[in-house]
Image (cartoon, rainbow, N blue to C red):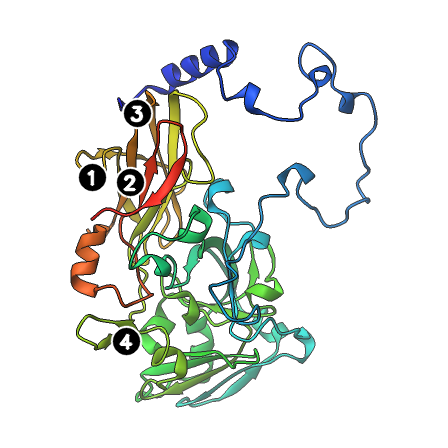
Amino acid sequence: MKQKKTSRRQFMKNAALMAGAGTIGIERSVANIEDANLPPSVPEWMKKMGRGVVTVPYGTPSPYEDKVIRRTVPWLTASPISSISFSPLHELKGIITPSALHFERYHAGVPEINPDEHRLMIHGLCENPLIFTMADLMRFPSVSEIRFIECPANGGMEWRGAQMEALQFTHGMVSCSEWTGVKLSVLLDEVGIKPEAKWLLAEGADGAAMGRSIPIEKALDDSIVAYAQNGEMIRPEQGYPVRLVNPGWEGNTSVKWLRRLELGDQPWHLREETSKYTDLMPDGSARRFTFVQEANSVITSVCPEKPLKHKGHHELEGIAWSGRGKISHVDVTFDGGVNWQQAKLKGLVLDKALTRFSFDWDWDGSPALLQARAVDETGYVQPTLGQLREVRGVNSIYHKNAIHTWQLFESGEVRNVQID
């Protein structure tokens, strides 16, 4: 197999030539297209009026995109009310995840909350305990920030070996949105933090009273009490009417349906930070409060759901992210890590947000082992699977951010595999 960087002009010229020649696997692979709708004919949809503006008052995707949906793994959790759905990363463009496709994680299902009856209470080690209505929260100066949220169990079923058959299931517990709300530090200033307050308990209004202990330093840094996502009020499955967003940290610390913030002098040692969301080490001990989501990346344009249909020019694409800050660069390899080449970062490169990368390459039909490796602005380099297992063993289900491998076959099919 030959890999080389190609100029954009040459890339597009070659693509046009292939299209004009009727390259096998592009036009001919598309099913159910009537010749009467193809050039030079006038397609049928040009011969009649379309629907009006009031037919669908809340927009919906095209029916031809009905496969772009969140999916679940039935065997992964015991019940739908304490379960996960995965975002279709292979179908997404840019860095913003549509609200309707943002991954879901529940511990007791989605509560139906009347915002007029919902309150956010801040109490504990503070001078002036307060209870805020939703109207109160929206009176404060707002911020809007693009940040990813990732479940720390993303990829967690792969510690012992490759078993998920699709990108959606290996990496689909990460999504990126624009979050709008009030900085938590502003609210804490209103209540007046006592000097002895070192931690904060965030509790949700769901049936599990999902809660996490948050160090006061994070609360005063970049935490957001968010009520809007991607330009509209947060959806119920994402925490309506208000949630906490802790950028770059384990998704479970971004407590949804937020109802209570209690200031204290030590962590609360709740179920979700003792029995769960701890990292079992080879010697039987467990890491705790491993808040930061480490640098990660994955190739999305070539994956089990997106096999290659023809030889020649392709734009390899993927996403990278880091809870430590911005992505500084991404490398790609076609031979399982023997030789690396630097990819191009595309579009916005933001702090604690998904970052797009791409690489123009030629595929001659040979087998390949495709990988991406992210490096963030702190100098942290995404580890190999062998490096991660050497330190962490194979008994954890959290914080698996190892370099991921797609095996590309001569047929163009792609399989999830593991190499050290």
The residue beneath circle 1 is 337
The residue beneath circle 4 is 288
Residue 373, quarter of the rendered image: top left
Contact, CB < 8 Å: mark 2 with mark 4?
Answer: no
Give the number of the mark in front: 1 or 3.
Answer: 3
What is the distance, in whole Å, between disc 2 and disc 1 at their CAs?
A: 7 Å
Helix, strand, or loop for circle 3? loop
Q: Say which label, 2 or 1, has the lower sequence index.
A: 1
Residue 404, percent across and down? 30, 47
Contact, CB < 8 Å: mark 2 with mark 1?
Answer: yes
Disc 3 crowd rating (10 Å Cα; few below 14, some 14-19, many 20+) is: few
The residue beneath circle 2 is 371
The residue beneath circle 3 is 366
Q: Is residue 270 above or below residue 150?
A: below
Residue 187, percent across and down? 47, 76
- From the viewer's perspective, tell me whether residue 158 is left or right of residue 251: left
The amino acid type found where label 3 is placed reads: Ser
The amino acid type found where label 4 is placed reads: Arg
